[in-house]
Image (cartoon, helix red, strand yellow):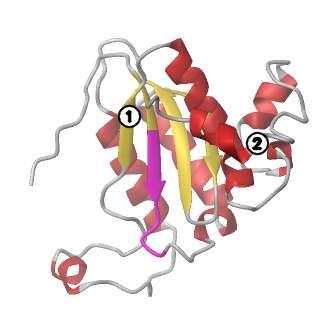
């Protein structure tokens, strides 16, 4: 099946990438491996990470690609493959994955969204930074260590206590526009 994906040269994209085992802690347990693999991919296929959060079993990222470049798919393939190569084998695999000699670490697909404008960009950054609170890992977004929120705080873009006291009804304003 061929999926239609938005492809804009030099575009900014929001991604959600999940592990196959949604009960896993693998991404935070192996955070250094993930960081090293991403750094290696950036060295060979440059892009900018505008914002990112890594949770135990999924991650969200906002990337801007270089001008004249639309190939985020190769970058994700290299990240997922590179990370998987550093993980001991033994995860459950479906017959389909076995027949294709695939690991069972990541979900095959990922969610991508082409950022439309500044408001869309801002909404997705807030979604990324608030996600550990939304999932109940922390009460304050800055308490989650695997988040670009710390860079935003250091740069004076947001306050350290950002997100405290957000009404859950307001969460609907984060992420994609309705």
Left of 111 or right of it: where is 130?
right
Q: In the depicted view, which residue is nearer to us: 26 or 84?
A: 26
Q: Residues within 10 Å of mark 2 (few under 14, many from 20)?
A: few
Task: Give me the residue at 60% from left, 49% from top.
Answer: 36
Left of 29 or right of it: where is 8?
left
Image quadrant for the N terminus? bottom left
Left of 130 or right of it: where is 79?
left
The residue tagged 2 is 167
Q: In the depicted view, which residue is nearer to us: 174 or 128?
A: 174
The residue tagged 1 is 113
Image quadrant where residue 70 sits: top left
The single residue placed furthest to the left in the displayed view is 1
Residue 134 visible in the current orientation: yes
Check residue 135 in the rendering and tell me which mark sits there, or answer none. Answer: none
Which label's residue is closer to the chain start, 1 or 2? 1
SS under mark 1: strand
Left of 65 or right of it: where is 29?
right
Picture coordinates of residue 108, whole percent (x, y): 30, 61
Task: Give me the residue at 37% from left, 16% from top.
Answer: 10
Q: In the depicted view, which residue is nearer to us: 24 or 34?
A: 24
Q: Is residue 100 above or below residue 98?
A: above
Q: Which residues are magenta?
A: 15-21
Q: In the depicted view, which residue is nearer to us: 80 or 96?
A: 96
Image quadrant for the C terminus? top left
Residue 174 visible in the current orientation: no
């Amino acid at each position: 099946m061929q999926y239609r994906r938005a492809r804009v040269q030099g575009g900014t994209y929001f991604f959600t990438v999940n592990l196959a085992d949604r009960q896993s802690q693998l991404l935070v347990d192996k955070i250094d491996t993930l960081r090293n693999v991403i750094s290696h991919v950036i060295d060979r296929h440059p892009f900018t990470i505008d914002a990112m959060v890594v949770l135990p079993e999924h991650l969200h990222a906002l990337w801007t690609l270089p001008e004249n470049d639309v190939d985020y798919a190769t970058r994700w393939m290299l990240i997922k493959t590179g990370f998987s190569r550093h993980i001991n084998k033994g995860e459950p695999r479906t017959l389909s994955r076995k027949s294709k000699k695939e690991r069972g670490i990541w979900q095959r697909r990922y969610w991508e969204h082409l950022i439309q404008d500044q408001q869309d960009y801002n909404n997705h950054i807030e979604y990324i930074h608030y996600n550990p609170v939304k999932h109940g890992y922390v009460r304050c977004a800055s308490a989650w260590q695997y988040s670009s929120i710390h860079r935003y705080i250091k740069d004076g873009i947001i306050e350290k206590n950002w997100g405290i006291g957000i009404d859950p009804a307001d969460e609907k304003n984060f992420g994609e526009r309705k």
